[in-house]
Amino acid sequence: MIFRELALAVGVSLKTSGLAALIASAVAVPAALFLSGRDFRGKKLILVVNQTWMAAPTVVIGLLFYSLLSRSGPLGGLGLLYTQAAMTVGQVFLILPLIVGFSYTALRQVDKRARPTALTLGATPRQAGWVVLREARYALLIAVLAGFARAVSEVGIAMMLGGNIRNATRNITTSIALETAKGEYRNGIILGAILLAVTLGINILVQTGLRGRERD
Amino acid sequence: MSAPIYRLEGLGYAYPGEGSSFRLELGSLAVGEGEILALVGPNGAGKTTLLTLLAFLARPSRGRLEYRGADPWAGGDGAIAARREAVLVTHHPYLFKGTVADNVLFGLKLRKLPEDVMSARLRSALALVELDGCERTPASRLSAGQAQRVALARALALEPRVLLLDEPTAGVDTGIGLRLEAVLREVSRAAGATVVFSTHDFSQASRLADAIVHLSEGRRVEFSHENCFSGTAESDGRLSWIEPRPGVRLHFAGQARGHVTCVIDPKDIRLTVADGEAAAPGPNVFAGKVTRMETTDASTARVRVGGDLVFRVSLPVAEVEAKGVSLSRRVLLRFEPESVTVIGPRTAGNPR
């Protein structure tokens, strides 16, 4: 595997999974804020469904979206199958419950007095919501990073929705699958190490930056 | 009283959910602008709930709560606007992550004040609570008492029209507590702010407040401010007592703990003339001399008796004449432990 191909695969992984983490967070964190801030009928059911969804195998999600995006499927006209966009959509669906669950736990651990304190000091309800998010920022970032790590390391969705097309939708995990299928175990292990190194680098960068700000 | 800033009519509040049986039920109450109002009562009396309602952090379940002549809950952003004027400092305040300055500046930044105004208010508010120079101290490193003072500074910096304080001096040492009391007086007198605070300490309420509202089990209770004695509750299992003066016990029924105030209605004290007679043993028998007598109307006399403790007794004029009560006469006073109202953290069994 030449270096250019490797760089492209790393780029596809970072792009699709990074985008999936951002999109899923934009939905999951407000949803978790809503769930953590009030009690209502059906909330427990939502949490149980979310927990169950977390355990969904990637190939099942891949298969579900494959049936939706394939030419004969209801969304076939969009022409998304075997594109990076399809991989991102599938990964969003994969990591959404994970980020909701982690964010919900993080926000439940914010002191109950934070919101009324912000309100009595003059914050609007929306500003008070931001204050609660800010108080949980470190744990929320961990939730987003966990979502990214799950997306970047999955192979089922990337393979089924991306199709492992060389220089287009091939990412690190589908490259590992290909190299292993070819019997190139050494390449597979090297790619696995690169995947871990990329994830480790991102974690170190983000957490170091955040801890530095926490100390200020 | 000056024009009311708050007017409460038939106000009621019940916590949502089925877990709590507590209900706040107040009749009518008006709080004058610039007034210092103390809410006195034991734990669970409803002081914090009332403060939360006055801060517009909870919506009354029923009745009407007017602020400056209007109902902030009537619609629009009324509650948000009212919250910007009425700031609550809770008993266990929450400090945001960050430094002392981050916390004090929080509300000022929301109000988008100029930088120089914010800096000046930060300095003056911290000076008022004697935490000058602590701007850069992380909030997580503060003691509970310091955190309480930072929370007060955070509220004072906003120069609120109404300052609501839940047990503002609990958890701080006596010297700082007295200093904070002076700050509250200053805020009310100089800045014209209305101050509503809760306390267990009846003597603090008497020192500071223009008016006192007594709460018990979610309701307002009325009784005389005479014959109030404070002390630390003790018990032998059968009766409980405080010692307002060393060696002088005032007994009450039931159990209580911590610092409490005992109040005896002047009408519940029986007076007998006791020239040369020693005080009979028993709870709540006090000997003394009549130091003052007056009539409040044609049929009722008020008698002040000085001894180990000073009591005021209310009794019919005819009884005064029949018993020969006169100035400087030695008298004995008796009242039942069940007649004593206890204000403070009760545990169980106190019938009043």
Image (spheres, helix red, strand yellow):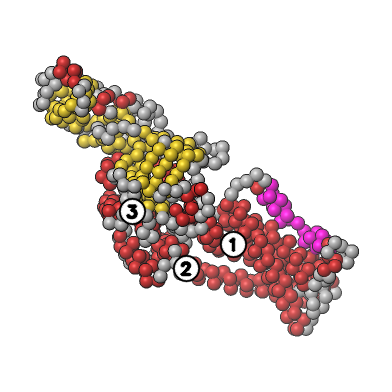
Q: How many numbered discs, if any?
A: 3
Amino acid type at mark 3 = Ala
From the viewer's perspective, tell me whether residue A215 is left or right of residue A157: left
Which quadrant of the figure contains the N terminus of chain B?
Answer: top left
Name the residue beneath numbered marker 3. B193
Closer to viewer: mark 2 or mark 3: 3
Query: Which residue is painted at 42% across and 41% down in the image?
Result: B8
Name the residue beneath numbered marker 1. A140
| Element carrying mark 2 | helix
Crowding near the residue tagged with mark 1, few <14, some 14–19, many ≥20 C-alpha atoms within 10 Å: many
Chain ID of residue with mark 2? A
- Does residue B277 show up? no
Chain ID of residue with mark 1? A
Residue range in magenta is A45-66
Amino acid type at mark 1 = Leu
User: Disc 1 vs disc 3: Cβ atoms closer than 8 Å?
Assistant: no
Query: Which residue is painted at 37% across and 55% down in the image?
Result: B161
| Element carrying mark 1 | helix
Query: Which residue is painted at 11% across and 23% down in the image?
Result: B326
Name the foreground residue: A63 vs B327: B327
Q: Which comes before the other along the chain, label 1 or label 2?
A: 1
Name the foreground residue: A211 vs A3: A211
Name the foreground residue: B39 vs B83: B83
From the viewer's perspective, tell me whether residue B128 is left or right of residue A162: left
- In the rendered image, residue B199, in percent from the top left (x then y), is placed at 34, 43
- In the rendered image, residue A88, in percent from the top left (x then y), is placed at 74, 68
From the viewer's perspective, tell me whether residue A145 is left or right of residue B4: right
- In the rendered image, residue B347, in percent from the top left (x then y), is placed at 40, 33
From the viewer's perspective, tell me whether residue A25 is left or right of residue A188: left
Q: From the image, give the main secondary structure of the stretch colored magenta.
A: helix
Q: Which numbered disc covers residue A215?
A: 2
